[in-house]
Amino acid sequence: MASPPPSSNADFYCKETMVVDIKSASDCLRYMAGVSRGLTGQHVHLSGPGDAGGSFCYVRREPLGVTAGIGAWNYPLQGCVWKAAPALAMGNGMVFKPSEETPLTALAFAEVLIEAGVPPGVFNVVLGEGDVGAALCSHRDVHKVSFTGSAATGRKVAEAAGLNLKKVTLEMGGKSPLIVFEDADLENAVSAAMIGNWYSCGEVCSNGTRVFVHKKMKEQFLESLLARTSMLRIGDPLDMETHIGPLVSAAHRDKVTGFVERAASDGAEVVSCDNHAEYLRGIKSSERKGHLAGGFFVSPTIITGASDDMEIAKEEVFGPVMTILEFESTDEVISRANATPYGLAAGIFTNDLRRAHRASAALDAGTVWVNNYNLTPVEVPWGGFKASGIGFENGPEAMMQWTRPKTVYIEMGDVDSPYN
């Protein structure tokens, strides 16, 4: 695909588009196409092992029919393909509504499918705001809705879909913990925290925004984090040298900065890396000129001194804002990490293999990364627990959710009737 125009995804800078959004979409298409050829039904022999001519059942995996996808504005191509690829591979049609903030990518993808030979009408794109999505969710001829977005909107999707008892997959937000134990590799842990908070300007549902750092490592961790973050380049998202671009809209920028302001009012310490360094390589917020003037920029911001009951440690910010929380014991940090209505993802940094396995099992999250963060291979399921969602995308589990099982019973003898 050619590079999309800036208006198609203004917050998502070029470098990330090449290595994440487009690549993940391509990987998903190839994986789903390959796996779908090997999926089979089930045969169950109902008689004894010596009865070769006995009755049996078989299970057919049938497509659902017309389905709907509702995408988010961050990762617009990946989000579209993660829904469309398994749906189409399993024989369904789809009507896809992209976010009104980033509509052009889905239109380009629809054109690519037609060029590749997919018949017109199999994959369709409709544009609009929330009322269009609501119509898809409530339409009687739509048999499944797959939604990515906020938990509040996801509940509305589930409610509307429930009126017709249709299937739903909901991939919603999170307040994911990233736990750094005292034996962790310091620079790897800092790298993961930066990826899990600054990548895509912090506009990632799985971001590890609650960074729990062991008391023995906290000072070193903060020192390295501040030094490395202060060297990032903020600027034009179309510049391949940019690390941090603008947020998606003025309204979202104001929402993010509002969280930061309230955190300061609640008594937390706010460290804006714009102010921490002599300069933030690229463009300081006070010096943005020309075509970047008035842009929706928020500098990477680190919150310390917060308590678990503060808004900044409880609510999804969806911007480049990282909260550092101190802990002393494994039991303590697991309990605090799980004390959230969300359960999308979590991360652990430790060189103790036993602790890594035990902590992974104890964390109430759909994906747990050990010694890395925010990797989403399409070969494994992606989805959350609790208020972070229902169902999964990717992996064989996702493909089955775009089908309905039909059991067929074959009687090879006479009907055993109790009536003469």
Image (cartoon, rainbow, N blue to C red):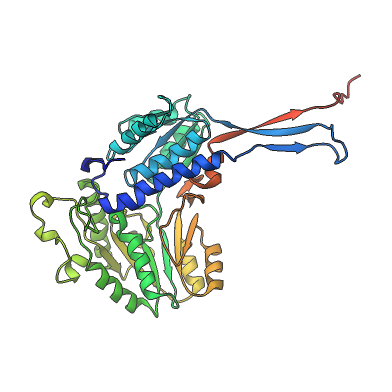
Q: In which quarter of the image is the N terminus?
A: top left
- Check the image and report above or below for 115 versus 85: above
Q: In which quarter of the image is the C terminus?
A: top right
Callout count: 0
Q: Which of the two residues, 392 or 191, is positioned nearer the viewer here?
A: 191
The answer to whether residue 43 of the structure is visible from this angle is yes
Q: Residue furthest front?
A: 116
Q: Which residue lies furthest to the top in this view?
A: 420
Question: Which residue occupies 56% across, 72% down?
Answer: 354
Residue 278 position, x and y percent, is 14, 71
**Quarter assignment of residue 202:** bottom left
Q: Which of the two residues, 206 or 54, is positioned nearer the viewer here?
A: 54
- Check the image and report above or below for 90 versus 278: above
Question: Which residue occupies 63% across, 38% down?
Answer: 40
Q: Which of the two residues, 372 or 4, is positioned nearer the viewer here?
A: 4
Q: Which residue lies furthest to the right in this view?
A: 420
Q: Which residue lies furthest to the bottom in this view?
A: 216
Q: Which of the two residues, 227 or 260, is positioned nearer the viewer here?
A: 227
- Check the image and report above or below for 129 versus 230: above
Residue 404 position, x and y percent, is 59, 33
The answer to whether residue 13 of the structure is visible from this angle is no
Relative placement, left or right, of 294 versus 346 is: left
Relative placement, left or right, of 13 versus 154 is: left
Residue 111 position, x and y percent, is 34, 31
Residue 137 position, x and y percent, is 43, 31
**Quarter assignment of residue 70:** top left
